[in-house]
Amino acid sequence: MLSDADIDQFIRDGFVRIDGAFPRAVADEGRAILWQETGCDPDDPATWTKPAIRLGGYSQTPFRQAANEPALLAAFDQLVGAGRWLPRDSLGTFPIRFPSPDDPGDTGWHAEASFAGEDGSWRLNVTSRGRALLMLFLFSDVGPNDAPTRILVGSHLDVPKLLEPAGEEGLSFIELAQQLPASTFQRELVLATGDAGTVYLCHPFLIHAAQPHHGTRPRFMAQPPLHPAEPIQIHRADGQYSPVEQAMRLGLTT
């Protein structure tokens, strides 16, 4: 269970870190599967020829188990609301990052898009259609040099005012990134480091970015969305706002 302080941090900073959210043994089992899928040899760095390899759609036992640990399910209820989210049976995309001097080409600051627009662009709107949380599941130990995701603390509060005028159709993630104020990039920077089994639960509007890997061992991380079971709302007649919604409302008024 998240504490009141954890929930306050989520609303204020845009994320909460849960250490030991799933067992290290589960991370080890999942990582073994992913190594096979990469076509690389874990014991031969000469086979690590790309800065990043993206794998997706994995629903084997360790990935289902990681996504459904009791502590995480309880946290979903606390942050999104009981009955307001859909269970996961997989962990979606794994962007695996390898030590490399090459630019991976995907290190720009952004918030995750959550639905496809009529023009085919990936978009997000003020009620985060299609995404209740961004989640980072660490399947390997991640230190400061191991390409940890970069997070701008509190940046989720800068997003609602940009999305509200765009209505239901919202903005593409590129359009949103272009409209972010300079003050967003002056916010405190935190790195999503931790031991295998750590999970970061992030507000869907949190501004974050990848970075090159300057360590020695590849980084294995999943970044699935938690899908909403019902539309997220910023105007509720009963006033029963989830922390995700509270943060959206705070961003509209500050």
Image (cartoon, grey):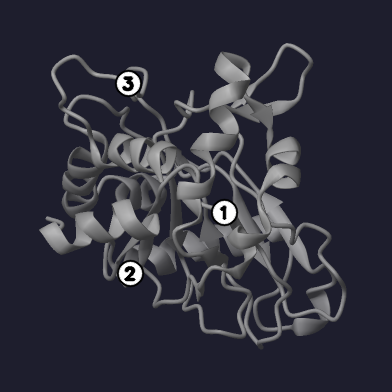
Image point 30% across, 51% down: which residue?
A: 11
Residue 45 image-quadrant placement = bottom right
Which amino acid does the dot numbered 2 rest on?
A: Ala
Give neighbour class at mark 3: few <14, some 14-19, many 20+ (Cα, 10 Å).
some
User: Relative to residue 180, is residue 27 depicted above or below?
Assistant: below
**Lower sequence index among marks 1 and 2:** 2
Which amino acid does the dot numbered 1 rest on?
A: Ile
Residue 49 image-quadrant placement = bottom right
Q: Nearer the viewer, mark 3 or mark 1?
A: 1
Q: Secondary structure at mark 2?
A: helix
Q: Secondary structure at mark 3?
A: loop
Q: Which residue is mark 2?
A: 25
Q: Which residue is mark 3?
A: 229
* Quadrant occupied by the N terminus: bottom left
Position of residue 230 measured from the top left corner of the image (x, y, whole percent): 32, 17
**Lower sequence index among marks 3 and 1:** 1
Give the alpha-carbon distance from disc 1 to disc 2, as whole Å.
31 Å
Which amino acid does the dot numbered 3 rest on?
A: Ala
Q: Secondary structure at mark 1?
A: loop
